[in-house]
Image: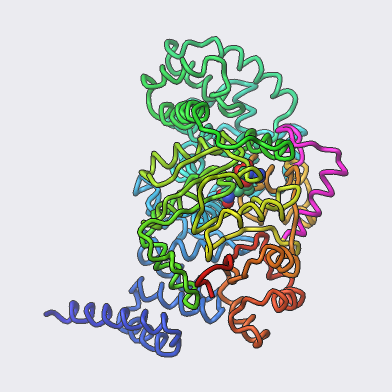
Amino acid sequence: MTAGSRRGADSARDLRVARRHLEKGRLEKATALLQTVLSRDPECADAHVEMGAVLEVRGRRLEAMRSYHQAARIEPGHAAALLRFARLAYTSREIEPSEVILAALEASFVDAERPPLDSSEAQARDVSRLMGAQLEARHDLRTRCLAPYRDGGGVEAALIERLAADRLLRFYLAHYVNVSTGIEYAATLIRRRWLLEGPGPEGPDRLAFLASLALQCFANQYAWFETSEETAAVEILENEIAAWPGEGDGVPALERFLLHALYRPPAGLPNATSLGAAADGWPEPVRTFARAGLAEPLAERAIEAAMPRVTPIEADSEAVREQYEANPYPAWRHHRAHRRESFASFARRHFPKLRLPWLAKARKHLLVAGAGTGREPIAYADRFADLDVLAVDLSRASLAYGERRAVELGVEAVAFRQADILNLADLDQRFEVVASQGVLHHMGDPAAGLRVLVGLLAPGGLLRLGLYSERGRDIVVRARVAIAEAGLGSGADEMRRFRFEVLCQPESHPLRDLLLTGNDFFCLSGLRDFLFHVREHRYRPRDLKALLDGQGLRFLGFELSHAGKRALYLREQPGDPEMCDLDAWERFETAHPKMVEGLYRFWCCKAGEGSR
Ligand SMILES: C[S@@+](CC[C@H](N)C(=O)[O-])C[C@H]1O[C@@H](n2cnc3c(N)ncnc32)[C@H](O)[C@@H]1O
């Protein structure tokens, strides 16, 4: 063995032990070992990553970011370094430009020529913010206030050429919902110039850039503002595309098709089906766009038409149904393949004190009530090998998206059905587990919806709920007041206008914080669900207690995404070591309103044989 390979073997062993120390919370020992590895090999990327993890647990966020940055410099394709850096960067108000991070993004995404990091939606959200900020800096696109757009605003041909040639930018636009105001500003200027003056300048990357922009506009559901001049020009263009047979005329016609797709969904064209058929003969990258913009929505339409309906829809649910038919939510794209396990082992690990005899059954039944676009039921069925999932929702369009994605991902154990929760009581089936996230708070009487779900639970069954919090959504309350004062409804035009008005405000304006609350502000269905919902209820812990007590449910605890919160709670509420006392949570939140998230996610249990 050479001295070099011995050093490598020693480092690998020390890293393994350091990880174990970290897992067990032995931070001093982990740090000492990592320092030994780094003094032996200062360029060991893995050691920097582990050091970052230790620093994170110690609450030293900036130093942790520096460690991840170091690892990314040494090994630009180090996925964990980049993802962890992105996660921490996500919570910064401003993200510093960094050539190292740009190189790491290039190596991990563009050079790999596929979305390489098997990303969950959360990871995609972190990466998109980081990528957007770095691209903005690379091209000097730091516009924060979009007001000049209304008064004209121009874009140089040289900038268009430079942007078109940037493969990372094209990748970003094609794969993520853009969250950078600077990129939105530049892209809307380019779109307008192309529409009103014709596409230019000529260049080898123009078609690819157009296609990536079209994918972006499709993904953000046409959330970007347009002037009345643009609206009039798009109408003329739309008539032209509606009469185009989909072949002949070569690139100019394809460019006109893509240009239209920067403003309107092609699946809405009267000739969408014939264009979809012709798209197989189109060259790349137009074909890739056509798959997302035409083929998939048309396939969903067919699924939607055949979707079985198992209950009638109540009059009280109609407005909510209409909202989600028009704007299915969430518009998810990224899926993390889960490590498979049984629900039984998950439940035993998380609720070790519960005796749940039904866990021994080979197959358990899960009802996802208000499944939306299928992200939730697909995640359950993909992860838990012993679950059969029934996913119901009011919105056929949402369910169709879910079913298409389930087939595409090879997830078989989910049945999608249209139903109104309020009418599910007659269902001739009982479920060991019921999940309903982001649903009951949109009902006229959430307690009535909950009563139905509890009735469908088998004795001792588990229920996972997601409900809005009062304290975590104060910015939403403020935005809803502003929307009401402006007299805005929830049409696409009105939502676009509201969004644009916010983007025209100075950065110090209180509503500008909406840009930091996730991706919902940046795509239209997200915006509708987030700020323009027909109805929502919000809760404090004491309200949750009343709601659950009223149904005889036992609260089993919140899912906490913030590791430090648990430690703080246990220190401040020593009388509640199980963290299941909602009165104690009320006291804790009163003291720390800023720590409250927008959505409570928690588990509860229906009383029944053996559940205590
Ligand atoms: C915010 S989305 C949440 C989707 C999904 N649970 C998730 O977290 O990804 C709310 C969904 O609840 C559905 N919903 C609301 N009221 C419902 C009812 N009475 N019956 C069935 N579904 C309902 C809506 O149609 C919508 O798709």
Q: Quadrant of residue 227?
A: top right
Say whether residue 183 is magenta. Answer: no
Q: Viewer-proximal residue, 242 or 533? A: 533
Q: Viewer-proximal residue, 353 or 476? A: 353
Relative side of 559 to 528, left or right: left
Relative side of 351 to 607, left or right: left
Say whether residue 495 is magenta. Answer: yes
Label total for image: 0
Image: magenta residue range: 473-498
Q: Is residue 180 visible?
A: no
Q: Is residue 357 above or below residue 220?
A: below
Q: Viewer-proximal residue, 117 or 297? A: 297
Q: Is residue 403 visible?
A: yes
Q: Residue at x 78, y 48 (%)?
A: 505
Q: Quadrant of residue 548?
A: bottom right
In the picture as drawn, the residue positioned furthest to the left comes out as 1
In the picture as drawn, the residue positioned furthest to the right comes out as 485
Relative side of 34 to 542, left or right: left
Q: Is residue 194 above or below residue 569?
A: above
Q: Residue at x 75, y 37 (%)?
A: 490
Q: Is residue 431 above or below residue 496?
A: below
Image coloring type: rainbow
Main SS, magenta region, reads helix
Quadrant of the snapshot with the N terminus = bottom left
